[in-house]
Image: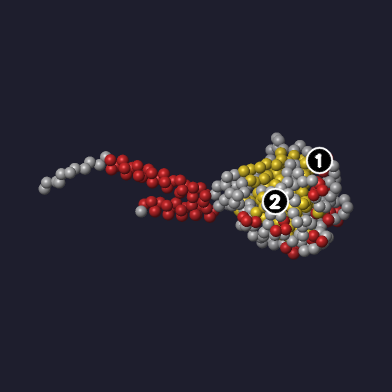
Amino acid sequence: MWLEVWLAALSTLCAGLGARGEHTDYSRRVSLQYNPGTSDQSVNLLHVRAVDNVSTIHYVWSTIGVPTALLIYTSSPTSELNINWTKLTSREPYGAIAIQPSSSVLYSTALMFTRIFEYSDVNNTANFSGTAEKSFYPTYDLSDFKWENANATLNTSSLTANLTGRYESESFQNGSVTFRVSAFGSSGRDLASPRLLHTANSSKLEFLMSEVKPRGNNSRFALEMFTLEKKKGRKKMVSVRSIDDEYTPTIFEVAQLIANMPNDSHAQGYFQWKSVAYGAVDGKRADSLPCQYYDLRLVNESLQFPSIVHAFFGKDLIERYNVEAFNVSFGIADGDFYDKHNFLSWSALIGYGTPPKDTFSTLVICIMAVALGTPLLLLIVGAVVVFSLRNRVYSSYEPIN
């Protein structure tokens, strides 16, 4: 009886703790705006402003040029984003995006999504970097896409918006590419796969390809990205592994692109994702597509594609910043090709500070405690009972009244 009571009490405690998950009390006041300061809806710019008592994080997402995300951390809770729209949409947008006061900016970086590669994987090896050049189809340059009005998808309650683009080709007759942006005011975990753990210092990106007609029967895809860091530092790719796949079954790796700036006194930005994509909207385990990332490549020449990075970082950004490129490819050897579902989704976080780290949840720890602790407790109780019985004195004589 007492054992049943103990197990019930422990299970109730674990369920209560598990329901609380990894949430913390830290939060930011977050807003999401579309094209602040102009009524022009021919271009897309989303501004996420995340404020606490001492700082502000500005995220600027735009499809002016290539799809780009700026991350700007300031030491002021009242810092503001200023945009000169006339200059921003001109051939020389330098200085069109600024933060006031400029002295409050402690850190800034950018992530640019430049090209989508498609290649024929006839041997089903998913070896993107080792595939011969002749197996690649002409790339899809994202600066050439036509982007829909993101204001139609803006949700200020859920803090989400879609940047959806189409390419003028037969492959994109019914297909599209979408960058879905999500902002967060507090810590939590996504309900959708791969169940990314986010904080109030992060924003989420989902890269979606839907109904794009592949140009071959064995097509795989990869996404090219550019990032930058001040000259005194560079980015580095870090692989974080865990034995816990509670939220993303069979996936044990988290990849992180972080700043490598020695002797810097404040935190930096990061780009984080789990090494998995999905071939269906509901993101079930059966639809998972492991993905691979590749080494950073230093870019020394000036950027040949238009982007809002020029508007914020200036004309001489190559002289003041290290620009690096890297790729993420989707699929694994002997796995499914894109045409099985004609759909691909991949999620990542962009944020400031320490990247979120998955740990065993309280619920899992309690379950382990029950599984390991109950046999141990039974062994201890059994030993005590045996010891007490061995020391009990028995007599064969009946007491005489």
Quadrant in the picture for residue 227: top right
* Above or below 8: residue 256: above
Q: Position of residue 294 (x, y in %)?
A: 73, 44
Q: Position of residue 206 (x, y in %)?
A: 70, 55
In this rendering, which labeled residue sits more in front, label 2 or label 1?
A: 2
Residue drawn at x 57%, y 45% as measured from the top left: 243
Q: Residue at x 42, y 47 (%)?
A: 374
Few, some or many C-alpha atoms within 10 Å of disc 2 (few <14, some 14-19, many ≥20)? many
Q: Earlier in the sequence, mark 2 or mark 1?
A: 1
Q: Residue at horizontal 70%, vertical 47%?
A: 292
Q: Residue 254: in sight, yes or no?
A: yes
- Residue at label 1? 320
Tell me residue 36's x, y (percent). 77, 58
Judged from this view, the residue extending furthest toward the front is 123
- Label annotation for residue 331: 2
Query: As drawn, is 224 to the left or to the right of 389?
Result: right
Packing grade of label 1 (10 A; few <14, some 14-19, many >=20) is some
Residue toward you, 337 or 92: 337
Q: Residue at x 72, y 58 (%)?
A: 339
Q: Amino acid at mark 2?
A: Gly
SS state under label 1? helix
Q: Nearer the viewer, residue 384 or 9?
A: 384
The three-letter code of the residue at mark 1 reads: Arg
- Who is closer to the viewer here, 26 or 113? 113
Residue 293 occupies which quadrant of the picture?
top right
- Mark 2 element type: loop
**Where is residue 242 drawn, in percent x and y?**
59, 44
